[in-house]
Amino acid sequence: MNIYVCVKHVPDSAATITIEGKNGINEKITFLVNPYDEHAVTEAAKIKAAVAAVEVIAVCLGKPAAENTLRSAMAMGADRSILIETDRYHDSIFTARALAAAISSDGQPWIIFTGKESIDSEGMQTQFRLAANLGLPVATNVVKVDVDNGGVRVECEREAGTTDVVRMTTPCVIGAGKGLNTPNYPTFPDIVKSRKKAVRKIGVTELAIEKPAAGMEIEELLPAVEQRAPKALTGSAADIAAQIVDILKNEAKVI
Amino acid sequence: MQPIGLLIEFKDGRVKKANFGMATAARGENRHLIALVVGASAGEAKASLEAYGVARIININAGKRGWDPAIQAAAVVAAVEQFDITSLIGLTSPAGRELLPRIAARLDAPLVMDCTEIDLDAHRVKTSQYSGKTIATIALTGRHFIYGIRANVVAPREAPTVAEVIDFAFEENQSSGYQVIETRTDGSGTQYLAESDIIISGGRGLKSGENFKLLFECAGEMNASVGASRVAVDNGWVPYAMQVGQTGVKVNPKVYIAVGISGSVQHFAGMKTAKMIIAINSDANAAIMANCDYYAVGDLFEILPELKKKLDERRRG
């Protein structure tokens, strides 16, 4: 049985983002596996360890450098991977079609994992579009997965203190949330082993995806302006507290 | 008239306040606001929605009572098609994160979540990307346009009108393979962080989960919500649902009070759009002190009890 894990190659959240041209960024910065996707890979490896005859395949749509993210996914437990190579940015409508096409051409999915969102474009939707393209049920922000005959039982954290328990038939798509597990950070032997695992490369044009009628195009990227001028509150603890209350009341007008 | 759909959310049987800012943002010349109410009672909502310019309320009966995003999304899609709605706006809330992408995926329509500006005529929005380090202008193309708006980006302004209520029955006749079998609440849920006007958050400086009661006490005095930094969550002091930041909730309050939080890039990604940031920290060199509106260098264990006392005195008049 095949577990596919869709991963994204994203800039480190601590990296400095420099805008290039009208809507691009300088990519000579540290990239890594999207953090939610690490939970997805880890969960897939956990299921593989518990269930017989499972293969875990990491799938990524990205530029050639995204192979590094697939190597990381394989060091964390994926058996092999597929890189859908492209030379440009794609929106989630196209990305979901490409992932669906690559998975369908590779084999029959049992479970498809993704992260619940990516930390670069923060679109929060690829998992849902992927599921719709394949006609599968989907759950998001999943923090627990139990596999049983014919389906999965997942727990989805919806909001503070509210959890939905959901049953899905398989195949299905699971969007991993942060509470799902502690990622398998690879050891040195894991990294060495991952170098021998296979990365199949497919050019995105080989998938012959028809240009979708709908789309989201980034027209412009601008740096977020931070123009706060900090003012000090001084004095005793009581003085500081009094000033805060005054600010809340008279300046912010919230109390 | 351009029909603009608004996906309305409820809390304890009443329309959530954040919907009124959303309705205000959606109003404009030649626009007809259509509120979509699913899984709740439109009757309760009528007066409050009319106050904010909603001209029509579609009361969707999706059969099954209770929360089921797969069924509710299918029902909303059916209503969107039935009433020729081309633009649909919802909140980027926990329910919105479940419903809006399901709706967009079913319609194969473009969607941008967490918009801070929406131009409904040009189908163009602004949203933050790369941990809040950039602002992207995104153009949407398609037959339908779906938008998730960030709560509180537009202040609610009343524009009274009279709305007609239309009942719309929806029956899902094919199994989606998805079923909510139980919804559990552990009682810790308070007001959803992203919709609060005032948030007081604690970080490493709080030293323990027990000490968060100092924040809850202050919050109680000013109807604020309590948030936390990733450090506080990773240490197990408070639940993940309270985490503000890159991998937590993104908030947009009028006032954000950061207590014992150094202010990492990832934390800022979740709160940098706050209208005012007040930082309390013992370290004058903490990053947050250089990127806030007011800062106090001091001991939070002395300042918080004083703050509670002053707030309490003020409340008692």
Image (spheres, helix red, strand yellow):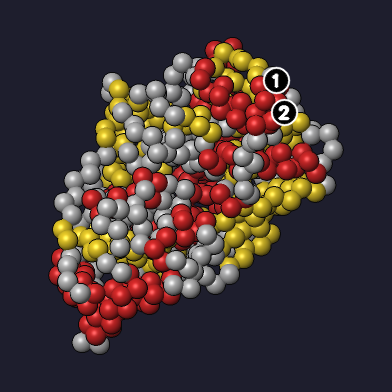
- Judging depth in this view, the residue of B284 and A251 nearest the camera is B284
Q: Residue furthest bottom?
A: B316
Asked whether B103 or A57 is in front, the reply is: A57
Quick check: B88 left or right of B317?
right
Mark 2 chain: A
Q: Is residue B13 left or right of residue A26?
A: right
Residue A74 on image: x %, y %: 66, 29
On residue A217, which mark appears?
A: none
Where residue A79 is drawn, which disc sits there?
2
State which quadrant residue A215 falls in: top left
Q: Nearer the viewer, residue B47 or B258?
A: B258
In this view, A72 is above or below B153: above
Q: Residues within 10 Å of mark 2 (few under 14, many from 20)?
A: some
Q: CA distance from mark 2 to mark 1?
A: 10 Å
Total tally of numbered discs in the picture: 2
Chain letter for mark 1, please.
Answer: A
- Residue A224 in picture, x, y percent from top left: 27, 39
Residue B50 visible somewhere in the drawing: no
A152 left or right of A18 in image: right
Mark 1 is on which residue type?
A: Lys
Horizontal and vertical percent position of residue B211: 44, 72
Quadrant of the image containing the C terminus of chain A: bottom left
Name the residue rendered at 78%, 41% in the picture.
Answer: A49
Q: Nearer the viewer, residue B72 or A104?
A: A104
Q: Is residue B290 above or below residue B51?
A: above
Residue drawn 71% across the image and 39% down it: A45
At label 1, counting other C-alpha atoms closer than 10 Å, the crowd grade (few under 14, some 14-19, many 20 or more) is few
Give amino acid for label 2: Asp
Q: Which mark is residue A196?
A: 1
Who comes first in sequence, dot 2 or dot 1?
2
- Residue at the location (43% across, 71% down)? B212
Instruction: Have a look at marks 2 and 1 and say if they share a chain.
Output: yes
